[in-house]
């Protein structure tokens, strides 16, 4: 099986990039052949940079469609522009098409001029997944009759293995990493901790 991913980047210092890279690395362990089309270059050796401009991406549709012809599954990570580009390029090819909604690019365009085409792209997908119930619920508010499966990103605990020389008086702590946004829930966490 050959899978093609479309994503913004694979930069481990970026939330979407980290998500994309972790997902792709995990799938590679299953000996699945894949290609990764990205808009922003990183240090990832197997990426194909397509463009970091939404307008240039749309002018690359024929090039992207040609790449799609040689795959079994197309997986777009986020809505704008990747789900839209994947839906357009896959139209008539009949490749299995998956969209993973990970953030603002899957929700915000449903509230502006991109709304109609993004809704169309969601309905073209064979499977739509979201990384949280919040993301899924926000999409469902704007896209009728859409079945979204929630798949919360896993954690590689080996990445966080403690050093063997940690002292016995170590106090547990809670760390939140990400932008401070109402939808991410830090406000609720702080209230709970204070209580």
Image (cartoon, helix red, strand yellow):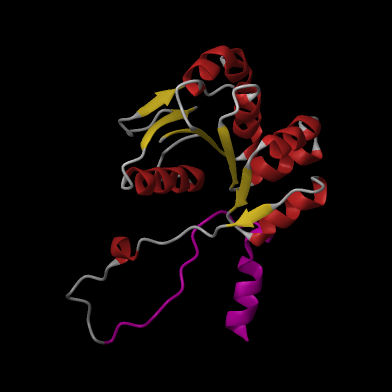
Q: Quadrant of the C terminus?
A: bottom right
Query: Residue 182 placed where, x, y %?
Result: 69, 60
Name the residue: 34% across, 43% down: 28
- Horizontal side of 92 relative to 14 (left or right) equals right
Q: Is residue 189 magenta?
A: yes
Relative height, residue 134 to residue 125 (above, below): below
Query: Residue 178 placed where, x, y %?
Result: 53, 55
Relative height, residue 94 to residue 55 (above, below): below
Name the residue: 36% across, 83% down: 171
Name the residue nearer the viewer: 42 or 63.
63
**Residue 57 sits in quarter:** top right
- Horizontal side of 194 relative to 8 (left or right) equals right
Query: Residue 139 placed where, x, y %?
Result: 74, 49
Name the residue nearer the viewer: 189 or 78.
78
Name the residue nearer the viewer: 9 or 144.
144
Name the residue nearer the viewer: 26 or 21.
26
Q: In the rendered image, is residue 28 in sight? A: yes
**Residue 2 sits in quarter:** top left
Name the residue: 38% across, 29% down: 47
Q: Which residues are magenta?
A: 169-195
Extreme residue toward the left, this view: 165
Q: How many marks?
A: 0
Relative height, residue 183 to residue 4 (above, below): below
Q: Is residue 153 magenta?
A: no
Q: In the rendered image, is residue 7 in sight? A: no
- Horizontal side of 48 relative to 169 (left or right) equals right
Q: Quadrant of the N terminus?
A: top left
């Amino acid at each position: 099986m050959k899978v093609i991913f479309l994503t913004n980047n694979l930069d481990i210092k970026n939330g979407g990039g980290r998500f994309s890279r972790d997902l792709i690395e995990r799938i590679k362990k299953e000996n699945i052949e894949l290609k990764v089309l990205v808009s922003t270059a990183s240090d990832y050796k197997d990426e194909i940079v397509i463009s970091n401009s939404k307008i240039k991406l749309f002018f690359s549709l024929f090039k992207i469609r040609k790449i799609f012809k040689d795959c079994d599954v197309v997986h777009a990570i986020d809505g704008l522009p990747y789900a839209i580009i994947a839906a357009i390029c896959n139209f008539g090819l009949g490749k299995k098409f998956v969209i993973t909604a990970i953030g603002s690019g899957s929700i915000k365009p449903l509230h502006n001029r991109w709304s109609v085409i993004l809704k169309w792209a969601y309905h073209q997908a064979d499977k739509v997944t979201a990384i949280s119930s919040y993301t899924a619920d926000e999409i469902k508010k704007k896209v009728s009759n859409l079945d979204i499966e929630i798949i919360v990103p896993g954690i590689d605990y080996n990445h966080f293995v403690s050093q063997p020389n940690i002292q016995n008086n170590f106090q547990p702590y809670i760390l939140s990493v990400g932008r401070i946004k109402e939808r991410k829930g830090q406000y609720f966490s702080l209230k709970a901790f204070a209580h």
